[in-house]
Amino acid sequence: MRFTAATLALASTASAAVLKGFNYGATHTDQSPMTQNDFQTLFQNAQKLSGAPGFTSARLYTMIQAGTTSDPTSAIAAAIATKTQLLLGMWASAGQTTINNEMAAFNASVKQYGSTFTDLIVGISVGSEDLYRDSILGIQAKAGIGASPDTVSGYIDQVRSAVKGSGVTAPIGHVDTWTAWVNTSVSAVAKNSDFIGMDAYPYFQSTMANDISVSKDLFDSAYAQTKAASQGKPIWVTETGWPVSGPQSNQAAPSTQNAKQYWDQVGCGELFGQVNTFWYTLQDALPSTPAPSFGLVTSGTTPLYDLSCSNITTSAIPTSTASATAGSTASATDAGSPGISGAGGSGAGAGGSSATVLTYTNSAGVTVATSIAIANGTSAPTVGTPVAPTSTAGITTVPSGGAVANAGSIAGVFGAALAVVAAL
């Protein structure tokens, strides 16, 4: 395990330093760059959010200012001005040159701002959902370019080495969908990470019962299985939420009432104050409204529903997969982040329900682990049973009814949720 003394010290005081924040993309929906004023307004609104104090952290998808090659994102200056803690991110699916550019932006920020910047860094995520996009599910979903486990793990080593001497002692890890984390082929990334960033959205689990009444169970299942695959590393919930408007996803209906129930049960009841959490999302990207829309506010600090967590009993998230998988052991809808503008990645969809992890042999003869859904009540094969090489017989892709939220950007595809159904 690669925890520094500072990391362990942080963990020992977790009860006093549990992170609460939101996710922030790099562009507007018309592809214009977010400015320092844009970020600063959002960070201030998050800190003053009515009924929900303590949202003083921000997760970024890239350290590069949109529209430039390697200039630092204006979010850094905004964070310094508002004393907002930063979970820094970087795009890890476009090759070594992009990693070099991300680190150039980081180094320029350290040189310009010094400790006023580095003291705000609570973590660095090397990539976002790259493993999902590189998996058979992501490829079938046409989720965009990804990166292999070896590539991501290598980038983590590079970043860890590059930040030495910068004054940064924050943990370095990776963010991905929960179904990517339970895939045995990515264990090297978990081993090399200081934390596991988990994205999970029961709303997108469209091949199974996913009404709001079972949403907490689905989230608990995702968390439990991610924890089981984490090799003892802490789990950070880097994306989750429920939409307030938009299309129905199987039984999952967007509404302010359902979004509040998910906030109360998952956010208030299990996450806030107990697990480092970056909710999706404070405010949807502008000027157009995505469908579905996950924003807590349309502007300002007044939420669309009560965020006060009043009369909510808190409890730890169940970590036994046996107790957490009620009704959710036969599906693997896996799609990435829901249309985040300028996220720096493919950004297609969200993590799904409990998955059966199998292996298959690809056309190059390489054995790869994957998660698939078992249809029609059939039993899953024993883990490790190979699926026929390159065969697509009986496999169907099931889109969840999304739309292109940011056409032309790297982070543009929304809601291309996929279920791979094996008719065994």
Image (cartoon, rainbow, N blue to C red):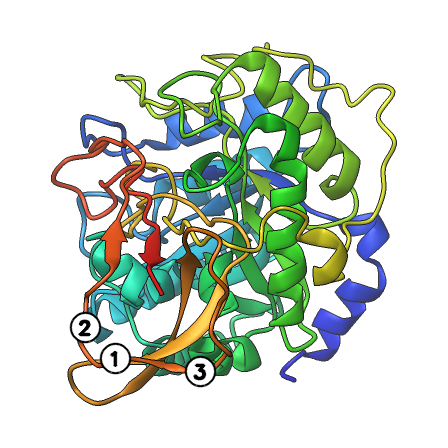
Q: Could you tell me how far apart the alpha carbons at marks 2 and 3 are, in whole angstroms?
A: 36 Å
Q: Residue at x 68, y 48 (%)?
A: 326
Mark 2, Cα crowd under 10 Å, few <14 / some 14-19 / many 20+, is few
Up-down relation of residue 104 to residue 205 (above or below): below
Labels 3 and 1: the sequence-earlier one: 3
Question: Foreground residue, 64 or 92?
Answer: 92
Q: Residue at horizontal 48%, vertical 49%?
A: 352
The N terminus lies in quadrant? bottom right
Q: Tags 1 and 2 in contact by the CB under 8 Å rule?
A: yes
Disc nearer the start of the sequence (2/3): 3
Q: Gap between marks 1 and 2, in whole Å? A: 6 Å
Quickly name the residue at label 2: 391
Q: Which residue is mark 1?
A: 388
Q: Residue furthest left?
A: 408
- Give coordinates of residue 90: x percent, y percent: 36, 59
Splitting the image into 4 quarters, where does residue 279 fall?
A: top right
The residue under label 3 is: 157
